[in-house]
Amino acid sequence: MKIENGMPLMLEEMIPHEERGWRPASLGECAAEIKRLRAALDEMDPTDREVLALRHFEQLTNGEAALVLGIQERAAAKRYVRALKRLKDLLASLPAGLTGLMP
């Protein structure tokens, strides 16, 4: 994963730019949401972060993630679902909870 300014490049790219029609206020809100997400990820077990990074940032399938992790595909799928649940719980426990992060 490419790192730039201490953040995974793909996470940084998720911040909308004004040329895409976003107002500066929206940029601030998005930056705050990313900060909360990073805080939650920092609290997670490295194994959970790894499976989330493989699935979301690297965009691997469960089968591909399983190969990287050296586990079976079903185990990778279960680990991914459990990591998502833990991330949701961590985000809910932070100030502002899930506000702005869930559709």
Image: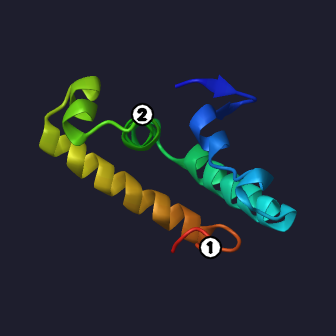
Residue at x 28% of width, y 47% of height? 79
Residue at x 63% of width, y 76% of height? 99
Give the amino acid type for the residue marked by disc 2 in the picture. Glu
Dot 2 falls on a residue whose secondary structure is loop
Q: Is residue 55 or residue 23 the one in the foreground? A: 23
* Position of residue 36 measured from the top left corner of the image (x, y, whole percent): 67, 58
Gap between marks 2 and 1 measured at Cα:
26 Å
Residue at x 52% of width, y 25% of height? 1
Circle 2 is placed at which residue position? Answer: 58
Residue at x 79% of width, y 54% of height? 18
Circle 2 packing at 10 Å, graded few (<14), some (14-19), many (20+), is: few
* Position of residue 103 measured from the top left corner of the image (x, y, whole percent): 51, 74
Dot 1 falls on a residue whose secondary structure is loop
Circle 1 is placed at which residue position? Answer: 97
Left or right: 86 in relation to 102: left
Give the amino acid type for the residue marked by disc 1 in the picture. Gly
* Position of residue 25 measured from the top left corner of the image (x, y, whole percent): 84, 67
Left or right: 49 in relation to 98: left
Residue 75 vertical position relative to residue 3 in the rendered view, above or below: below
